[in-house]
Amino acid sequence: MMRVSCLVAAAVLALETAEAFSPSSMLSLKGRAAPAISRRAGGAPALRMQQATVDRAQDVGEGQADERKAAELLMQPCPITVWGQEIDPVEAQNKVKNMQLPEFPKKLERPSQMDLEAEEKYFKDNKEAILADLEKHGAVYIKGFDLMKEPMGFEAFWKALDMEACLDPLHSVAGRPVVSGKNAVYEAVNKPSRSKFFVGMHNEMVGKRTVTRAAFVCFKSAEVGGEFIITDGMRILRDLKPDFLKSWYEKKVRFSSAQLPMGFMDKTGPLQPVLEPVLKSVLGAVVDMKVDFEVEMFWNRVNGERVIQAHAPPQPPVIPHPDTGLPTWFCNVHSHSAKLRDERDGVLPETTGASKLNKSDVFHGDGSELSEADLTHVDEIIRKNMEYVAMKEGDVMLIDNYRTMHGRNVFEGTRKHAVTWFK
């Protein structure tokens, strides 16, 4: 009877927490209060925040069924991740050091007064130049236009560039609210409950799937804070220590995207070694049915408590860009590391429901822990290269997702930013 109860309990936990595999949800747990974040080099200081506010119905999934269906009718899943061939990370770094890296991001302002029709024609006429700038610079900041101030005009913008939209990498687990399924627009971490938490720098990927490009649009900026943040993967690669790069590339990294509490297993006595492999298999099967990306289940102990963690397969932190072949840093340690997240936002209090399981972390490929010195180093380099962008209504940040990492500052008030992903 004990064995059956354990299996049922674990299966229920897995089914209730599929959203725990969302990289963005891992960063923002309901009911937390975060301390101030210190000023970072090259960017605006984060805000001192207190209590989170209540999420809207849309934020917790209500009324999303029709929008999700509309998105599924319009778009295909985002592409499979292109990891490319193995490279020597130090040689790759030296190549970047010898380059004159271009302006980041490239800025594009409306050249003259235009009506909406003329703005759309401007993007059609200049699409080759805009996309060439995107490939060269890694990001293009488009500002001062009126066309993109609402979803239909935003859709007209990216269609003028002949880009093909795709589903969110986490669409299968409803990890991100859909603003407008018929216009291919997803919400960009605007939940009131997440306003107090700094979204670390990351590429939009889930291991198996990665979007190629993205367009982030501002429909309304927050009253205070909420800056969109980007950083250039090539500049990060350039500035990291060679010994660090060599070590991490050889060891690889793997991400723990969810953590299920299993403290009751310590009370099963002699049944524990029998039940652990069974529970691991059951939970793995349940998760495989729910998500379309790869995870492996691992037993671990965190703060003395028995847990089972869902880990992505080992990944290289540096890859050749799938289009240009140029090497770039491609690793979400800044957003996923529990240590770095807790240093920014404070220690997580006890929560309830699925949020209790949204605990990400990063390990080496063999499951060993990352050193504190390494985490401090990579954090310093990423902060050094972060660009804070205070986007205004109608502004768009077009990014090359393999090269450019993105994040978001904490904010007060109402923030309405959105995103469309592209193949």
Image: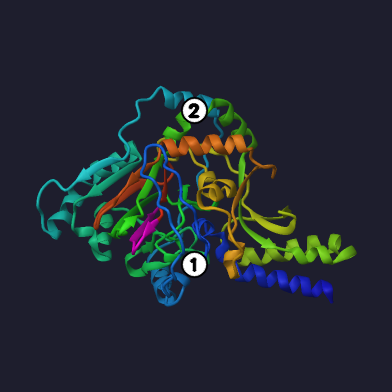
Colour mapping:
rainbow
Q: Can residue 317 be seen? A: yes
Quarter of the picture containing the N terminus is: bottom right
Is residue 329 or residue 209 the one in the foreground?
A: 329
Where does label 1 land, which residue? 174
Q: Position of residue 300 (x, y in %)?
A: 73, 53
Indicate which disc, 2 or 1, sits on the residue closer to the N terminus.
Answer: 2
Secondary structure at numbered mark 1: loop
Residue 365 is left or right of residue 107, and the answer is right
Farthest residue, direction left: 113
At horizontal 51% and vertical 45% (from top left) the residue drawn is 334
Tag of residue 92:
2
* Circle 2 Cα neighbour tier, 10 Å, few/some/many (<14 / 14–19 / ≥20): some
Q: Position of residue 277 (x, y in %)?
A: 79, 60
Q: Give amino acid for label 1.
A: Ala
Secondary structure at numbered mark 2: helix
Position of residue 246 relative to residue 285, above or below, is above
Q: Give amino acid for label 2.
A: Ala
Quarter of the image holding residue 129? Answer: top left
Q: Can residue 203 be seen? A: no
Is residue 300 or residue 134 the one in the foreground?
A: 300
At horizontal 54% and vertical 29% (from top left) the residue drawn is 89
Tag of residue 65:
none
Residue 255 is left or right of residue 161, and the answer is right
Prevailing secondary structure class for the magenta stretch in the rendered image: strand
Is residue 266 or residue 157 the one in the foreground?
A: 266
Position of residue 60 relative to residue 114, above or below, is below
Q: CA distance from mark 2 to mark 1?
A: 37 Å
The residue stretch that appears in magenta: 411-423
Position of residue 329 relative to residue 292, above or below, is above
Q: Position of residue 377 (x, y in %)?
A: 54, 34
